[in-house]
């Protein structure tokens, strides 16, 4: 199996600590930044803020309701938060870097997933990018709206 990466980034006009706090807060903050659709629900099963949190969420993708469960880790608290799908091992990383002025944050959402080898894998990767990248762009826009209101 080959690895495929999907990402989107944005400069958010708010301090990095404030931005990261919203992303890491699965009880309230993270709920507010999820684009609906395709997200249908997000339930905190354990914890609620940062590392140790476990979530269940549903997305409607291509007309089909899909359920996921993920565990949250913080390899670099305050800078890097990771959601790992408990079934597939797919990893989505939220990275928050200080902007040049120190008053803004450069945020990147990246998903690393496995695809088949060869032409089928390239098609899977292309399709996954076309499906998920616009979701991440919307999520970053909603993050901007949440931290600037």
Image (cartoon, helix red, strand yellow):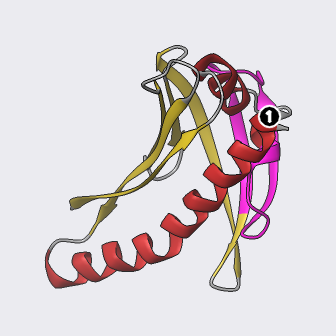
- In depth, the one of 127 and 20 nearer the eye is 20
Q: Which residues are magenta?
A: 31-58
Q: Farthest residue toward the top? A: 77
**Residue 21 colored in magenta in the image:** no
Name the quadrant of the C terminus: top right
Identify the residue position indicated by label 1 in the image.
Answer: 29
Q: Nearer the viewer, residue 70 or 127?
A: 127
Label tally: 1
Q: Is residue 54 left or right of residue 71?
A: right
Residue at 24%, 75% (x, y): give it. Answer: 121
How far from the left and from the top, in percent, is residue 132?
Answer: 52, 67
As drawn, the residue found furthest toward the front would be 101
> Residue 76 appears at what percent x and percent y?
44, 15
Asked if residue 114 lies left or right of residue 147, the reply is left
Position of 140 relative to 95 (above/below): below
Q: Where does residue 7 sit, x and y in percent of width and height?
A: 41, 54
Q: Is 44 covered by the magenta stretch?
A: yes
Q: Residue at x 70, y 66 (%)?
A: 59
Q: Residue at x 17, y 84 (%)?
A: 119
């Amino acid at each position: 199996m080959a690895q495929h990466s999907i990402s989107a980034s944005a400069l958010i006009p708010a301090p990095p600590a404030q931005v990261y706090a919203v992303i890491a807060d699965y009880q309230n903050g993270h709920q507010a930044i999820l684009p609906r659709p395709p997200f249908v629900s997000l339930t905190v099963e354990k914890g609620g803020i940062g590392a140790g949190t476990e979530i269940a969420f549903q997305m409607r993708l291509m007309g089909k309701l899909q359920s996921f469960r993920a565990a949250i880790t913080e390899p670099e608290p305050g800078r890097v938060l990771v959601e790992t799908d408990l079934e597939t091992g797919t990893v989505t990383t939220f990275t928050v870097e200080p902007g040049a002025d120190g008053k803004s944050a450069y945020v990147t959402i990246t998903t690393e997933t496995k695809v088949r080898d060869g032409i089928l894998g390239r098609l899977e990767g292309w399709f996954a990018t076309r499906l998920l990248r616009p979701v991440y762009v919307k999520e970053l826009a909603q993050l901007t709206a949440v931290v600037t209101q």
